[in-house]
Amino acid sequence: MATPTTTQPRGSAKVNRLGLEKSIYKGLDSTLCNGCGHDSISARIIDACWELGIKAEYVAKFSGIGCSSKSPAYFLSRSHGFNSLHGRMPSVATGAMVANNTLTGIGVSGDGDTGSIGFGQFKHAVRRNVPMLYIIENNGVYGLTKGQFSATADVGQELKHAGLNELPPIDLCLEALVADCGFVARAFAGDPKQVTELLKAALSFKGTAVIDIISPCVTFNDKDDSTKSYSWGKTHNERIFDVTFVPSYEEITVDYDEGQAKEVELHDGSKIVLKKVDRSHDPTNRMAAITLMEQAKTNQLFVTGLIYINNDRPDLRDYEDLPETPLAHMPSSVTRPSKESLTKLMQGMM
Amino acid sequence: MAVEVQTKPAPAPSREPIVNDFSITIATKNGSGSQTANATILRALFKMGIPVSGKNIFPSNIQGLPTWYTIRVSKDGFTARKDESEILIAMNKATVIDDVQKLKPGTMCIYSDGLGYTPQRDDVIFYKIPAAKMAAASGLEGKLRGYAENMAYVGVLAHLLGIEYVELESALNHQFKGKTKAVEPNTKTIKMAMEWAKVELTKADSYRVERMDKTTGMIMLDGNTASALGAVYGGVTFVAWYPITPATSVAEALGYYLKQLRTNPETKKPTYSVIQAEDELAALGMVVGAGWAGARAMTSTSGPGISLMAEFAGYAYFTEIPAVIVNVQRMGPSTGLPTRTSQGDILPCYFLGHGDSKHPCLLPGSIKEIFEFGWRALDLAERFQTPIFVLTDLDFGMNQWMSESFEYPDREIDRGKVLKAEDLERLKGNWGRYRDVDGDGIGWRTLPGTDHPLAAYFTRGTGHTDRATYSEKPEEWEGNLERLNRKFESARKEVPAPIEDRVTGAEIGIIGYGSTDPAIVEARTLLAKKGIKTSYMRVRALPLSESVGSFIRAHDRVYVVEMNTDAQMAQLVKLDTPELAARIFHLNKNDGLPLTARWISESLQKMEA
């Protein structure tokens, strides 16, 4: 069967559908370590936004604290960025996305930021279904403080300074699933194609889209036996699907055999085409997704791809019944009730 | 109905009637539904034109622990708490002996026969009422019958004091928004109790009420509702909060009034969003996120909530993001006394956050001012791009107060310094988020979503240049902090100025703020009667106005009156005017109860001696 293609020319194209070169989507030079997985994710964010023709001015970037959280400075320099407090990105993004419901939200967090100090906020943002892309750059280690275990580190793992980790890992995909997240994916920073396609799909999803990207820390956690290392990722990355994202403004030009691929349509009319690799998984079945993640956790399987998708949950904008005009731009004539209304209110209290 | 009347002879002293000048304490059990009864009495008196105030001294408990509700009736318009009450309504077996013990000779007590209490004093007039039987006659069942017992004391009290039935009925209609089904059983019990009292009781006390015209045009409400309304008329568009006593009703009132006043009549859509957060960290986080993105955002909290908000308060101070935090102060430290009042968060709020952070704090001194500062706080937050604290307290927040009617905001909504795409075009993109182009320390900001390639900037809690880029350079760090101090000085001139009442020839000055105002006002009249002249400055905001110094200079001794243990405002005053420290005296008390005029007056006299 043929791989679905899109009319969007890739690679060779100088400009995207907004007529912009990819360099427009770049950020400042990274100050992370050479070879850091986070930098390749930044590059994929640039790719995805450029390929989709997203207007960077309408994007808001959010992060918490940690190596990962520095990275929003390294992509989309035309977007407002909010490098917040440790573990508090979800609440900040919640407020901002409600204040202006026309923004596209991209959040970058780490395993410490999300899995420990910000665990509660993460779960509640997912529960509220804050419309945003929520990337976890997961390396199993605290980098900026030089090599402590994070809550996603594997049992039995040893690190130079931290010693032996005896506690079981927190699986952030599982946590997202349990919190009713409608878009849960896992990817490997060393697998650029899949990361890009998942990012594009997530950016078009209505609600919180969580992508847990295993992103090796070359300085503190890249030993071959670490499940967060490059070599482990390269040898163990088990893609469930070949993921292809087809934006709403493109047609799927080729078809594929029945049973070979699954097509999921998103709210904006775009489609995610999931071509089975060898494992059989129904990404629209939440219990199946939970089971798959439990199996992966128990057996240290590195399954990647779109784990779960559910288009049906209302997002926070629906829950809040937000008006078309962003709250941020409500004119004073609307936000200050009339003098007569106050007079009436006062009479009622007399 | 079996009748039991007071049998003790009335004490001999003067039978001169005491009209519209006494306090009533109603002792009940928490959760017994007495709030409705007490509010009915309060409102009926208010509508009879008599100045009143009501204070609920309640436990941190849902059901069973003792509660005391005090209504002060004051023909002179004093609304502060008094040290004791002249009328006791005893409905709680657990406290009746103590409660009666506190009564002064010549006062009176109405008590329920259900307490199994036998009066032990003959210098107090007792009226025993068959509350349970009266409630049974109401026809109500179960819990509601218990509530009707409260209406029994309302009826008896109304008869004894002369509270007009028609005002009681209209108060109930007001409370139940005219729902006959809810009003009728209550009015029925009240009427029955009034009839019973008329036949069975012989009035032996001297207390009565008489209609006046001193509340015309006044309103009655709690401070938390005033806070909420201030924000509604201030154009708030985003609220995030977490339940905590005594601030919860701010958010609840916001929800209620926003729906009523801020639903777009055409689209039926809200023009606001209210989110109950997972904790106070997230509540302020959401507010800061919303404020950054351009909403008029606020939260309300108290005590431990303030501690949790410390990290975002410091963040918003340093990154310069508008936010309003209403702090309905309760007693701390720690969990403290969650249902008791205090002014213990002056220093914690002023300096909230690690490093050199500091925040303007508004200190409303009346219900009307709580409303006014409610909308002004949102303007100030956006003008100065910084968190603004509004400090009320439990006494203001959760008690019913009579108040002058609120005045509609006298100025347009101020959205502060925001650059739009066309401004950036005009500036050819030459702008810096933290650049002080106007000399007031306030930079210009852009909002995310601004359609200009150079609109974006990167908000960070780390060191930054005036273009919001990362910097660890010592001179850039210092320059930024100096500018923040300039901005703070600009705020000093814009926050509400103190209100002064200078008395010619007064050697003594009093500085006060917040909910202690009614007690200070009354204390000054007590002192004046003793020939002690005092001037009064009511501080309304931090940072302190420069006029505080001149007020102190104009007096030999200045007493700072406040409800906290560490004399927090006095410390701040000394910090601002160290050269005058020797003239400044602490007049502080912090026992969980609102200050009384007598305590202020007597303590001041003692210190003077």
Image (cartoon, rainbow, N blue to C red):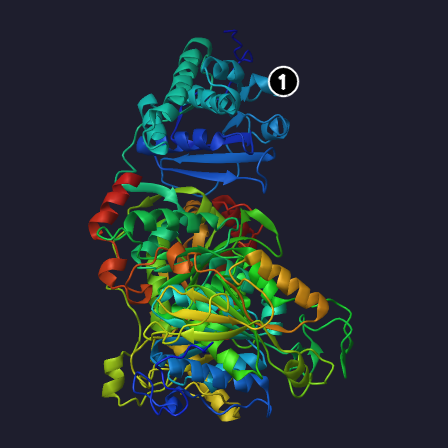
Residue B400, quarter of the rendered image: top left
Q: Residue furthest top?
A: B2
Residue B255's x, y, as percent? 38, 49
- Disc 1 marks a residue whose amino acid type is Gly
Q: Is residue B81 visible?
A: yes
On the image, numbered disc 1 is attached to which residue?
A: B116
Count of labels in the image: 1
- Which residue shows up at 38% across the image and 56% down it? A318
Query: Mark 1 belongs to which subunit?
Result: B
| Viewport quadrant of the C terminus of chain A | top left
Q: Nearer the viewer, residue B392 or A61?
A: A61
Residue B110's x, y, as percent? 51, 21
Looking at the image, is B493 positioned above or below residue B17? below
* Left or right: where B444 falls relative to A166: left
Q: Nearer the viewer, residue B22 or A156?
A: A156
Q: Is residue B544 visible?
A: no
* Left or right: where A264 falls relative to B606: left
Residue B434's x, y, as percent? 39, 83
Q: Nearer the viewer, residue B287 or A30?
A: A30
Looking at the image, is B317 positioned above or below residue B129? below
Looking at the image, is B143 positioned above or below residue B521? above
Residue B298's x, y, as percent? 41, 61
How crowded pointer 1 is (Cα within 10 Å; few <14, some 14-19, many 20+) is rated as few
Q: Nearer the viewer, residue A238 or A203?
A: A238
Q: Could you say whether the residue bearing mark 1 is in a helix, strand or loop?
A: loop
* Left or right: where B274 falls relative to B308: left
